[in-house]
Structures are given as structure tokens and as C-alpha cells.
Image (tube, coloured by chain):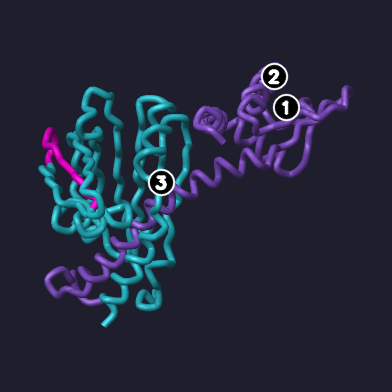
Amino acid sequence: MNTNQLDAVFSALADPTRRAMLARLAQGEASVSELAEPFAISQPAVSRHLKVLEQAGLVVKGRDAQRRPCRLDIEAMGAAQKWIETYQQAWEANFGRMDALLDELKALPTTSTGDK
Amino acid sequence: MGAETTSPAAYTAEVSTPGDREVVVKRRFNAPVSLVWRCYTEPELVKRWLTGYEGWTMPVCEIDLRVGGSYRYRWRNSEDGSEFGFVGTYSRVDTESRIDHTEMMEGAEDMPPSENVIAFEPLGDMTELVITMTYISAEVRQMVLDTGMTDGMGSSFDKLDELLALERH
């Protein structure tokens, strides 16, 4: 996954309505009208959100001409997830060292703020 | 609470990207806010944990913690001697509660800074830290994250294990 596509994925994920639509699709495919149901927005608005999700590669439209069901592209979601996990590990390394430091500080008599 | 049975590894950082320009990092610490605050604001303490990559040290850590004051962080790679740094200015300092500051790459100060908020939430004897970083655009966020933080960090866990082993006696 290149940087541009990752950008598109994160922009797509930045909107709460689109995240809710993805959460719905995570449970199984759905047509545009089924997707629109739980939201207080028009079908055209839902279609616009879908277009953003499709362009980011997160959602694929099925071939059934009648229903055009949408489904999640697990692979694209996975790439975004993987990226977040890598970033998380970077922070975790810092915070792990901070844990050890905090334990040390807690053991110092000068920093104790009373009995436990 | 059984605090003595809680190992540091029991907490993990949660990273989320709620908007297209933000990164939010949340982490719980088994220590009171006063100590977490010190780890963040006393240079000698900051130098001991904010070293990121395996093989990096933090030779420069200057903190002038007041509104309008600035800070300077600089890291050095002990292998090849390369260095990079961050500089910024504090716009809000609420003792043991919240710090707002800008952040720029040293040497790239012409680029618009990110705006960071560090919130320290007390949870009984523990602390929840919430860091919100807002970049000027989605593209800048991506660039900073791609270049700044994400390579070869897993090995830092080994360093953590060593450090913890030293602390346990």
C-alpha cells in the first residue's frame, strides 16, 4: 500500500458516518438503501460517502446489477490497521521505559505522598 | 488494587486517527499524575525514556515550562552519529493537568508546526495520558509518521526488558 492510498484510507476513516458504514459492512454485505437506513441522511449523501470509501479501496461494489451490494475490502482495512500498530509499537517502546522509570520514582522516599 | 501484581506490560498504548489531521495516543500508567508529570517535564527524566529507536540517545533536552517558553529535544544515533530534533513553544501549562505546545522538526522550522495537547487524567492512584497531535494537513501527518517514528522500534522492547530487570531487586 503506497502513501497516497494510505492517505485516502485515513481520510475516508476520518468521518464518523463512514466509520459507521464500515462497521455495518463488517457484519456482511449490504445494498445502498440498506446502508442508508440507520442514518438520518439522504441516499445521495450515502452514495457520496460510499464513493469515498470505494476510492480508498475500503469498499467494493458487487456485480449484481439489481442490488449492487457493497462489501468491505478486508485487505485495505488490514493495511491501515497494520500501520497504526507499527506506530503504536513506537510509542509503546517509549512508554515501557517510562513505566520502569515511574516504578523507580515510586520507590524513592522523597516522592512518596503518604502511605499506600 | 493489588498494584504490586500489575506489571508495566499490562498497559498498551492505544493509537487512533479520529480526524484526517490528528493522531491520538492514549496510555495508562500505574503511577500518580504527579510522577507522570515529572517524567514529562524534568529533562533528566525525559532523557531516560523518550529515546524511541533502539540505538538512539537523547543528548539534548531543554525545557522552559511556562506559557511562551520553549523546548528543544535532540536525538543522536550512536551507530552513525546522525542527529535530529524537535523544537516548539508552550501555549498552555496547567500544572499536573495539561500542556499545549507546538512541534517542529529542527531545521525545518519554515514548515507549519503541529499543535499538540498532552492531558494528564488522574484515575485513583493511576494516570491516563492522552496525547493529541494535530498536523496542518493529512499529507503532513502522513509524512511525519512515515519518517519519524515507525521503523525498527520493536527492538526497544528488549531494552525495556533489560531496564525492568535492573529495577527488580
Specify few, some or many for label 3: CA neighbours under 10 Å numbering under 14, 14-19, or 20 or more.
Answer: many
| Helix, strand or loop under label 2 | loop
Q: Is residue B37 above or below residue B86?
A: below
Range covered by the magenta-colored residues: B66-77
Asked if residue A77 shows in the view, the reply is yes
Q: Residue at x 23, y 23 (%)?
A: B110
Q: Residue at x 31, y 52 (%)?
A: B52
The extreme bottom residue here reads B169
User: Which numbered disc covers residue B150?
Assistant: 3
| Helix, strand or loop under label 3 | loop
Q: Residue at x 25, y 38 (%)?
A: B100
Q: Which chain is cyan?
A: B
Q: Amino acid at mark 3?
A: Thr
Asked if residue B125 shows in the view, the reply is no
Q: Residue at x 21, y 75 (%)?
A: A107
Q: CA distance from mark 2 to mark 1?
A: 7 Å
Q: Which residue is mark 1?
A: A36
User: Which numbered disc covers residue B103?
Assistant: none
Q: Is residue B22 above or below residue A110?
A: above
| Side (left or right) of A69 relative to B46 | right
Q: Nearer the viewer, mark 3 or mark 2?
A: 3
Q: Which residue is mark 2?
A: A42
Give the prevailing secondary structure in the magenta stretch. strand
| Side (left or right) of A25 relative to B39 | right
Q: Quadrant of the C terminus of chain B?
A: bottom left
The residue closer to the viewer here, B73 or B28, is B73
Shade of chain A as shown in the rendered figure: purple
Q: Is residue A42 above or below residue B75?
A: above
Task: Please state the chain letter of the residue tagged with numbered disc 3 in the rendered image.
Answer: B
Q: Nearer the viewer, mark 1 or mark 3?
A: 3
